[in-house]
Amino acid sequence: MSALREALRDLPDAVFADMLESDDAYLLVIDLPIPPDATAQDADAEMDRGVLELRLPKESSTSGTTITVTERA
């Protein structure tokens, strides 16, 4: 798996990745910077032939609370 280790070294500094290997499996740990408007609600992931795809929906812009500020006279 030296090709995978080399690929992990080529990731940008903002991405942390580590790979652990046992006799029967690999554990790949990756920390990605996620945009602040991404939400885990209804998130989805698929893996096909070694390609992991993540779908992280954006939070609705209407989910926040609006506070009206008025000027005192």
Image: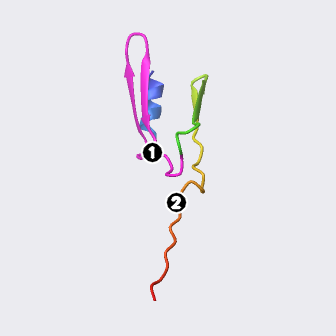
Left or right: where 55 falls relative to 68: right
Residue in the picture at 49% in, 79% down: 70
How many other residues sit within 10 Å of disc 2, few (<14), some (14-19) or many (≥20)?
A: few
In this view, 43 is above or below 25: below
Give, as a three-letter code, the residue at label 1: Pro
Label of residue 32 in the image: none
Looking at the picture, tell me which residue is in the foreground, 17 or 65.
65
- Disc assigned to residue 65: 2
User: Residue 11 at x, y = what percent?
Assistant: 46, 40
Residue type highlighted by circle 2: Thr
Q: Residue at x 53, y 57 (%)?
A: 64
Q: Are marks 2 and 1 in contact (CB under 8 Å)?
A: no
Mark 2 lies on a secondary structure that is: loop
The image shows residue 19, relative to residue 37, as above or below, that is above
Relative to 5, 60 lies left or right: right
How many dots with numbers? 2
Q: Quadrant of residue 61?
A: bottom right
> For the point 47% across and 33% down, which residue is it?
7
x, y percent for residue 22? 37, 14
- Quick one: label 2 or label 1, which is nearer the N terminus? 1
Quarter of the image for residue 42 reads: top right
Q: Is residue 35 magenta?
A: yes
Spatial CA span between label 2 and label 1: 35 Å
Magenta stretch in the rendered image = 12-38
Provide residue 39's location: percent of width, then percent of height: 53, 44
The front one of 14 and 68 is 68
On the image, numbered disc 1 is attached to which residue?
12
> The N terminus is located in which quarter?
top left
Q: Is residue 42 above or below residue 33?
A: above
Q: Secondary structure at mark 1?
A: loop
Magenta run includes residue 23: yes
